[in-house]
Image (cartoon, rainbow, N blue to C red):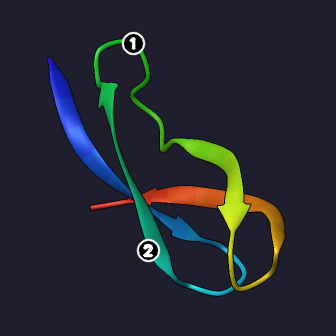
Amino acid sequence: MRVNIILECAETGERLYLTSKNKRNTPEKLRLKKYSPKLQHRAVFTEIK
């Protein structure tokens, strides 16, 4: 069962990325390093509801 999630930057709080994940395989919150235009480098983005 795949669900859509929004990723929020841990440093700036901006919500830029929309992705999906399989809740059965990864029940914990997703944390990915993505590019942040405000910071102009990669930053940690975490899953929000």
Residue at horizontal 39 percent and vertical 12 percent from the top:
25
> Residue 48 or 14: which is nearer the viewer?
14
Q: In the image, residue 24 lies at what x, y percent?
A: 29, 15
Rate crowding at label 2 as few (under 14), some (14 to 19) or many (20 or more) other CA atoms within 10 Å: some
State left or right for residue 40 relative to residue 35.
right
Q: In the image, residue 35 lies at what x, y percent?
A: 70, 59
Looking at the rendered image, the quarter that the N terminus falls into is top left
Total label count? 2
Where disc 2 sits, the SS reads strand
CA distance separating discs 1 and 2? 24 Å
> Residue 28 or 10: which is nearer the viewer?
10
Q: Which image quarter: residue 21?
A: top left
Q: Are marks 1 and 2 in contact (CB under 8 Å)?
A: no
The tag on residue 3 is none
State left or right for residue 8 relative to residue 4.
right
Residue at horizontal 69 percent and vertical 70 percent from the top:
36
Instruction: Indicate the amino acid at tag 2.
Output: Arg
Q: Which image quarter: residue 47?
A: bottom left
Q: Earlier in the sequence, mark 1 or mark 2?
A: 2
Is residue 26 placed above or below 31 in the rendered structure? above
> Residue 7 or 40: which is nearer the viewer?
40
The tag on residue 25 is 1
Q: In the image, residue 8 lies at what x, y percent?
A: 50, 69
Looking at the rendered image, the quarter that the C terminus falls into is bottom left
Residue at horizontal 29 percent and vertical 24 percent from the top:
23
> Would you name the residue on which mark 2 appears?
15
Where disc 1 sits, the SS reads loop
Residue at horizontal 77 percent and vertical 63 percent from the top:
43
Instruction: Indicate the amino acid at tag 1.
Output: Asn
The mark lying in front, picked from 1 and 2, is 2
Furthest residue to the top? Answer: 25
Is residue 10 placed above or below 2 in the rendered structure? below
